[in-house]
Amino acid sequence: MISILSKFISRVFNSLLRGKRKLKIGIYGPPNGGKTTIANRICKDWLGQEMGKVSAIAHETREIQIKENITVKSGKKELEFNLIDTPGIATKIDYEDFMKHGMKEKEAKKRAKEATKGVIESIKWLDNMDVVIVILDATKDPYSQVNITIIGNLAARKIPVLIGANKIDLKKANIKKVKNAFPQYPVVGLSAKYGNNIDEFYEALFDVAR
Amino acid sequence: MLTIEFIPYHEIEKLSSLGRIKRLLKTAKENKIVLLEGRLTKEEEAELIKTTMEEINDEFKGIELEVIDPSKVRGGPMIKLKNNILDMLLGNRTGLTIVGPASVVKAIKKDPTKIQFYTRDVKKKKKR
């Protein structure tokens, strides 16, 4: 009861503070979870254009990317926001991993350097977010320390969180495991790539951001 | 040779957040695995990742981080109650933080009954 009341007060207080300022929705998560793919899906659905490049090689997004004035509609409901796609958060970056994908040493080192800066920026931007979508790869272990640290930091800042358990089009995906790992947060299984369950995802976003 | 260094909580208790992070990273950069009694705060964990990123270079590739938080251990209501009381009384002193250099530790996996370190074959890497 106290927790519900405190969440309600926090939301009212935040919306008063926010006033006419546009809501900022951030996309966070570890590398290669599908953050830019979901950002592209949202932008394509509601702006008709994509946000960024996606790649099978980790750390493709190495800078904060912002798309302004997105309006998502569902029935009579409307949600206006600026979408912020962030570089994946990791505890290690080895340029030699990029070389395994055919990159030359110089290029790999440059990518690694940019990726470290990207992680720092992502963490710095945590304080600027009003709502965060955490995108996790549902085929991987959700209990990784990076996931726990990201979600723990959002909880400490009292930022509302929606967890997207991505890649449900793959056989190995396990939404139940993601739900069990973070029982206190709404979790929606989706495929950002193919759009599976995307309507349920938008509904959940309305609930979290209202 | 694999070296594990245990840091008791009292050794970091009086340090600032930055001091704790520097202490952990200094040891990890010496290619040692750190077992810290207790936990960092969530903000300190994020700061640890940020500082790690600032220090990454050709030699230091980052860290593997794992935190054992007894209040999050799955179990019956009595176990949860006991762990929550301990957590309230002792705060971040409970649990264990493991920090390993990524050049030595490939992965740390934990399940309710054990922690496993997967180390890299350093000798093989040197020969290449």
Image: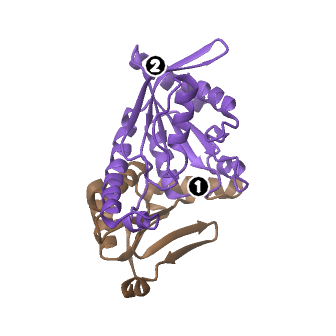
Chain colours: A purple, B brown
Residue type for callout 1: Lys
Q: Quadrant of residue A91?
A: bottom left
The residue shown at (69%, 58%) is B75
Disc 1, SS: helix
Q: A198 or A177, which lies in front?
A: A198
The residue shown at (62%, 28%) is A202
Q: Quadrant of residue B6?
A: bottom left
State the residue position of label 2.
A15
Query: Against A11, is B67 above or below?
Result: below
Query: Against A15, is A140 above or below?
Result: below
Residue type for callout 2: Ser
Letter of the chain that mark 1 sits on in the rendering: B
Q: Where's residue A153, x and y in %? A: 44, 44
Tell me if residue B108 can be seen: yes
Q: Which mark is residue B46?
A: none
Tell me if residue B15 can be seen: no
Disc 2, SS: helix
Q: Where's residue B34, x and y in %? A: 39, 72
Q: Where's residue A103, x and y in %? A: 40, 63
State the residue position of label 1.
B72
Split into 4 quadrants, where in the image is the N terminus of chain A? top right
Letter of the chain that mark 2 sits on in the rendering: A
